[in-house]
Image (cartoon, helix red, strand yellow):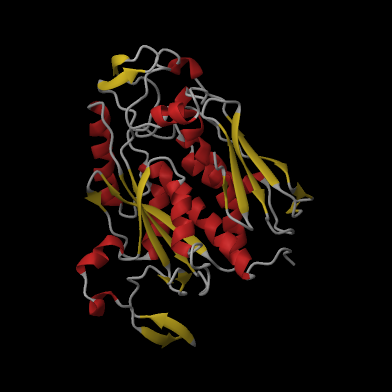
């Protein structure tokens, strides 16, 4: 497995859904950053299951614990090791169907790749549970980026075909944290919630889109040709279970535009260089332009559904029918918002350190 991301600010994920814990090791965090466990908790709370009727009923406290890398309230420059313990795991729920791969999950591919030795309980390493580690790394990265006045906003822009377009950034800051689906429009949020509740009653699930907006990103971040800002960020986004598509700026719609419509004209603004539009999503040639970095992440419907599905018993090599029981989100999009924010923050932090904009020691 490849469990690490980044080259200077490197994060290494560990743990399984129903093991003792999940966690993250952050290597390359600058020394001198004020950091405590309370700094991790707000984002962990946003990702935590069991908070509403439209999320998994799994009851985890998700208390972030820092095991190393902090002394006298500040980072030392040594690796940070942070964990969240699994306190409400029910591994027995997966024993009866251990040899029957769940459609839409990584059960079959993990079985083939690791010869049947992979932890199948709740998806093991392939579970959304492991993203708690990324969220903790993201909390650290956000604190570092704040030193550069970089702010990362995330919100749910679509669920089940129901769309909400952010009209301004203040709307995202104010409204997205205030409802269970993290939508920037309160009225649209209610429609999304009802759609999720309907899907749940039908034993089904919904997918959607998360939009990430990074404000204050300085121009010049990105390492072409293969470590472009889009490439590194896309890799981080695709590490999130359930993500099936990523776009930046105008995204796939550029295929329908003319060059005169898609180009972002340059202007002088407040003593610096800006563009009159942002079709590029703040990135040209794989390098940040100084405009807001805009990305959208497509998240598939939760594959664990209450309807009967066809599968194969891998031990008996015969057809099987599977009706998944357990504690699952009817829509994982709302809980993916903070995870996508974390992924973006980790990449921006790594690229800022590579560019020398962030220093190894904070004075």
- Residue 23 position (above or below residue 312): below
- Residue 246 position (above or below residue 63): below
Task: State which quadrant residue 102 falls in.
Answer: top left
Which residue is drawn at the image coordinates 36% and 11% (left, top)? 316
Q: Position of residue 41 (x, y in %)?
A: 58, 44
Horizontal placement of 294 versus 287: left or right? left
Q: Position of residue 163 (x, y in %)?
A: 25, 52
Quadrant in which the N terminus is drawn = top right
Which residue is drawn at the image coordinates 35% and 72% (left, top)? 278
Horizontal placement of 163 versus 67: left or right? left
Horizontal placement of 1 versus 206: left or right? right
Which residue is drawn at the image coordinates 23% and 33% (left, top)? 198
Viewer can see residue 8: yes
Q: Position of residue 318 (x, y in %)?
A: 30, 14
Residue lying farthest to the right in this orientation: 72
Q: Position of residue 275 (x, y in %)?
A: 38, 80
Task: State which quadrant residue 146 falls in.
Answer: bottom right
Viewer can see residue 270: no
């Amino acid at each position: 497995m490849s469990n690490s991301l980044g080259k200077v600010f490197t994060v290494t994920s560990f743990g399984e859904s129903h093991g003792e814990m999940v966690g993250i090791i952050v290597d390359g965090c600058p020394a001198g950053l004020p950091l405590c466990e309370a700094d991790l908790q707000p984002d962990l709370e946003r990702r935590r299951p069991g908070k509403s009727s439209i999320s998994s009923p799994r009851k985890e406290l998700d208390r972030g614990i820092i095991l190393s890398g902090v002394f006298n309230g500040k980072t030392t420059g040594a690796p940070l090791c942070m964990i969240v313990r699994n306190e409400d795991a029910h591994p027995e729920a997966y024993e009866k169907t251990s040899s029957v791969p769940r459609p839409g999950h990584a059960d079959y591919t993990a079985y083939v790749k690791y010869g049947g030795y992979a932890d199948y309980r709740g998806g093991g390493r392939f579970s959304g549970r492991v993203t708690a580690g990324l969220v903790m790394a993201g909390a650290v990265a956000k604190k570092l980026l704040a030193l550069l006045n970089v702010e990362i906003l995330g919100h749910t822009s679509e669920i089940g075909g129901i769309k909400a377009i952010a009209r301004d950034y203040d709307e995202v800051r104010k409204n997205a944290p205030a409802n269970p689906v993290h939508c920037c429009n309160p009225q649209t949020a209610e429609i999304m919630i009802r759609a999720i509740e309907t899907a749940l009653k039908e034993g089904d699930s919904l997918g959607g889109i998360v939009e990430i907006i990074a404000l204050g990103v300085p121009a010049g971040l990105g390492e072409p040709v293969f470590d472009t800002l889009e490439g590194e960020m896309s890799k981080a986004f695709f590490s999130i279970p359930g993500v099936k598509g990523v776009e930046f700026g105008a995204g796939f719609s550029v295929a329908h535009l003319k060059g005169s419509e898609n180009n972002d004209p340059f202007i002088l603004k407040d003593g610096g260089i800006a563009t009159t539009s942002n079709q590029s999503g703040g990135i040209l040639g794989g390098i940040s332009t100084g405009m807001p970095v805009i990305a959208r992440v497509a998240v598939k419907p939760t594959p664990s559904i209450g309807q009967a599905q066809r599968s194969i018993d891998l031990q008996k090599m015969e057809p099987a029918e599977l009706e998944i029981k357990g504690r699952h989100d009817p829509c994982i999009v709302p809980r993916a918002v903070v995870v996508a924010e974390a992924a973006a923050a980790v990449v921006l932090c790594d690229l800022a350190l590579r560019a020398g904009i962030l220093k190894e020691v904070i004075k």
